[in-house]
Image (cartoon, rainbow, N blue to C red):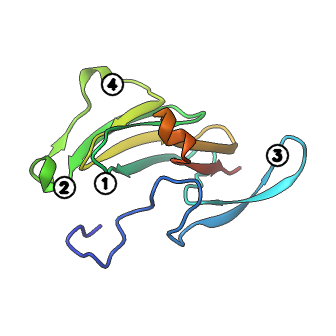
C-alpha cells in the first residue's frame, strides 16, 4: 500500500455498510433456513489462517473484537507522522501474547493480527466501545466452507 499516493484508497472504513465498492455479496444460510446475501469484504475459507491489517485513521484507540475467532497480535506499525516515525514496528506487549479475541488499535498505527478461521458462519468484527458499536462501527464477515 502506497501511503504517499492520495489517489490510492487506504482501506475500508469499519462500518456495517461498505461504501468503498469493494464488497462482494455472499450467500449465507440462516438458522431458520432462509438464504440471505450479505455484502462483505472479508471472506476466509474454513481452515484459512490470515493476517489482517487494521489501520486506525482516528485520534481514538479502538478495542477491536472479532466474533468466534481467536487471534494472535503480530505487531504494530506507525504510518502517521503525528504518532511517531512512519515505518516503526513494535512487537506485542507482554500482556498481548497468546490468543486473544480483542486488540487495541492505536491511532496512526497499523495493527496486525493473525487468525485461524475454523468455524463456518456469518460473524461480525467491531469496535468494543459501546457508542461505536451502537453507531454501526462493525463489519460482517463470512467464513465459507
Farthest top residue in view? 95
In the rendered structure, find residue 57 and report the number of the disc placed on it. 1
Q: CA distance from mark 1 to mark 2?
A: 8 Å
Say whether residue 39 is visible. yes
- Left/right of residue 8 with respect to residue 36 in the rendered view: left
Residue 89 rendering spot, x and y as whole percentages = 18, 45
Instruction: Please tell me which of labels 3 and 4 falls first in the chain.
Output: 3
Residue occupying image coordinates x 23% and y 67%: 3
Q: Quadrant of the N terminus?
A: bottom left
Label ID, residue 113: none
Residue 78 picture location, percent across and down: 19, 49
Mark 2 and 4 residues: CB-CB less than 8 Å, in contact?
no
Asked if disc 2 and disc 3 are in contact, CB closer than 8 Å, the reply is no
Label 3 – label 4 distance at C-alpha: 35 Å
The Cα atoms of the two marked residues, 1 and 3, are separated by 34 Å
Q: Which mark is residue 80?
A: 2
> What SS does tag 2 mark?
loop
Residue bearing the label numbered 3: 30
Question: In the rendered structure, are the residues bearing label 3 and label 4 in contact, judged by CB atoms less than 8 Å apart?
Answer: no
Query: Could you tell which of marks 1 and 3 lies nearer the N-terminus?
Result: 3
Residue corresponding to mark 4: 97
- Do the CB atoms of the residues marked 1 and 2 lie less than 8 Å apart? yes
**Picture residue at 32% right of the left edge, 44% below the top:** 111
In this view, the mark in front (2 or 3): 2
Amino acid at each position: 500500500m502506497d501511503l504517499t499516493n492520495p489517489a490510492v484508497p487506504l482501506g475500508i472504513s469499519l462500518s456495517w455498510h461498505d461504501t468503498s465498492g469493494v464488497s462482494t455479496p455472499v450467500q449465507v444460510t440462516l438458522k431458520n433456513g432462509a438464504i440471505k446475501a450479505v455484502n462483505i469484504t472479508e471472506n476466509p475459507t474454513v481452515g484459512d489462517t490470515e493476517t489482517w491489517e487494521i489501520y486506525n485513521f482516528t485520534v481514538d484507540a479502538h478495542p477491536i473484537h472479532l466474533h468466534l475467532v481467536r487471534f494472535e497480535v503480530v505487531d504494530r506499525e506507525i504510518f502517521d507522522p503525528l504518532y511517531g516515525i512512519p515505518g516503526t514496528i513494535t512487537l506485542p506487549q507482554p500482556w498481548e501474547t497468546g490468543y486473544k479475541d480483542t486488540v487495541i488499535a492505536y491511532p496512526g498505527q497499523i495493527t496486525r493480527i493473525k487468525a485461524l478461521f475454523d468455524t463456518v458462519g456469518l460473524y461480525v468484527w467491531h469496535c468494543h466501545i459501546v457508542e461505536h458499536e451502537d453507531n454501526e462501527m462493525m463489519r460482517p464477515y463470512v467464513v465459507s466452507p
